[in-house]
Image (spheres, rainbow, N blue to C red):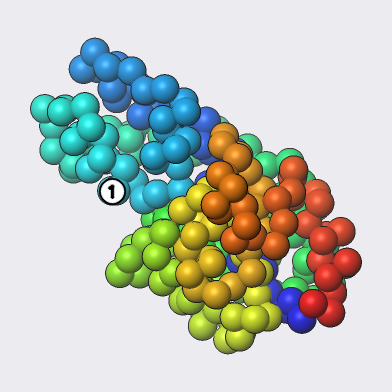
Amino acid sequence: MIHSVIFDLDGVLIDSEEIYFRLYSSLLMKFGYSLEKQEYAQCYSGKTAYENMVKIIERFGLPIDVSYGLEHMKMEEKKYLEEGIPLKTGAKYLLEYLKANGYKCAMATSSTRQRAEQILKFHGIKDYFQRMITGEEVKKGKPEPDIFIASCKGLKEKRENCIVIEDSEAGIQSAYAAQIKVLCVPDLKVPGRKYQIMTEAVLSSLTEVPDYLEKNRNG
């Protein structure tokens, strides 16, 4: 039986993947390069900022180091954070449903804790989460299972009693490797068939999650 729900942040709870695409595109434009949205969705969505910056620098041969690239991204994203990155459709509705029905919630994000907490506080939803595990706190990021295993431990919950909500192939693979049920709510890219079969279901939005949980209450 499902007792706890573990959320990814970017692309699941907040509508940030489009913003990240713009930020990486802006960085590359400074050096005369462009990034296709399909390549971003395929290669960078769901990964840590550090991993992505290493890959971007190598992919395009940029004359910068990782620290410069990360600082550029941090400064450019600041205005979006101050204005508030929008929640995904159905996010608040789902969180209220989970709270009303006694589910515990955790956040498992590749983001930094400072950034994640800033976003949750801006939207007034931080108190819906009993635990938060960030990319800074695990040795290996997604698609390795570390972050979801740590989330279950943080909730003091058996893995079979948890379910993950993810949007990316890396996130799905991470939850599957951790032997935790996973729902996919796609964002920029619908995961390939190889990853879809790792999920319990592929849903069109967060508004469908309560119906799934009701139908599978004893599963």
Residue 114 placement: quadrant: bottom left
**Would you name the residue on which mark 1 appears?**
50
Position of 181 relative to 111 (above/below): below
> How crowded is the residue under tag 1: few (<14 C-alpha within 10 Å), some, or many (20+)?
some
Along the line of sight, which residue is nearer the eye, 13 or 177? Answer: 177
Q: Secondary structure at mark 1?
A: helix
Name the residue located 63 percent from the left edge and 43 percent from the top edge.
Answer: 186
Image position of 74 (left or right of 10)? left
The answer to whether one can see residue 127 in this image is: no
* Position of residue 195 measured from the top left corner of the image (x, y, whole percent): 56, 53
Residue, x 29% and y 25% (percent of image)?
Answer: 27
Q: Is residue 31 left or right of residue 101?
A: left
Nearer to the camera, 95 or 152: 152
Q: Quadrant of residue 28?
A: top left
Instruction: Look at 16% across and 27% down and name the residue there.
Output: 62
Residue 85, x across and y down, in percent: 57, 37
